[in-house]
Amino acid sequence: EAGVAQSPRYKIIEKRQSVAFWCNPISGHATLYWYQQILGQGPKLLIQFQNNGVVDDSQLPKDRFSAERLKGVDSTLKIQPAKLEDSAVYLCASSRSISTDTQYFGPGTRLTVL
Amino acid sequence: LAKTTQPISMDSYEGQEVNITCSHNNIATNDYITWYQQFPSQGPRFIIQGYKTKVTNEVASLFIPADRKSSTLSLPRVSLSDTAVYYCLVVPNTGRRALTFGSGTRLQVQP
């Protein structure tokens, strides 16, 4: 079974620029998560989707971050405009359903904002 | 959500057994205890989960005392490849099941 795919793996931008990350979850997984992991810290949930609906986006900085999962499969996370403090690894994870414990994580996208 | 506390770092040598203890004093009746492992430049990976007593799989064992206020992840005979960050999480049995990660325990295995 193929794992969670993310692209790009690395991205360097200047502050105030825009950036987008893509995630393709494991086939058949209904629930998709985006996490932000700052260096030296554990991942922090940004947004959770169940199919194409948002379940939890309480920690998403909505003034600059947006995410969508239009067809209930792959997802895009966007930052516009980026700030220096957005430098982090952005992890995508998926699970079979909202009631399933095990989440499968992708390799992440390392974002550096200069 | 129950807050977890675990050591920031641990050192070990190859072939030794490593025990990482996590405290979760405010764990709720319906909460499970879950451990994830994260290697550098990779996403976290599920290791083991339990509710009470002892759970064992091919990777690790998880010991949970009767009061469930703490848990211990046991890694038998570690190797260099076990060098990673280990996260202890308390996951509700109901609801959204989003994971709340702490800072984890950084395990360094030396030859």
Image: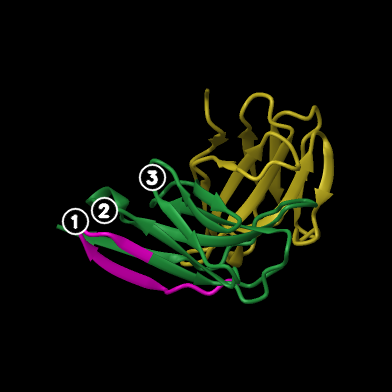
Chain colours: A yellow, B green
Relative placement, left or right, of B9 versus B88 is: left
* In contact (CB < 8 Å): disc 1 and disc 3: no
Asked whether A86 or A29 is in front, the reply is A29
Q: Are marks 2 and 1 on the same chain?
A: yes
Residue at the extreme right of the image, as rendered: A53
Relative placement, left or right, of A45 versus B63 is: right
Disc on the earlier residue, 2 or 1? 1
- Secondary element type, mark 3: loop
Q: Nearer the viewer, mark 1 or mark 3?
A: 3
Give the Cα separation between the discs numbered 1 and 3: 15 Å
- Say which residue label 2 marks: B78
- Secondary element type, mark 1: loop
- Secondary element type, mark 2: loop
- State the image coordinates of residue A8 (x, y, percent, origin top left): 53, 38
* In contact (CB < 8 Å): disc 2 and disc 1: yes
Crowd rating for badge 1 (residues with CA inside 10 Å; few <14, some 14–19, many 20+): some
Q: Are marks 1 and 3 on the same chain?
A: yes
Asked whether B32 or A45 is in front, the reply is B32
**The disc numbered 2 marks a residue on which chain?**
B
**The disc numbered 3 marks a residue on which chain?**
B
Residue range highlighted in magenta: B4-19
Give the Cα separation between the discs numbered 2 and 1: 5 Å
Report if residue B87 lies within the magenta region: no
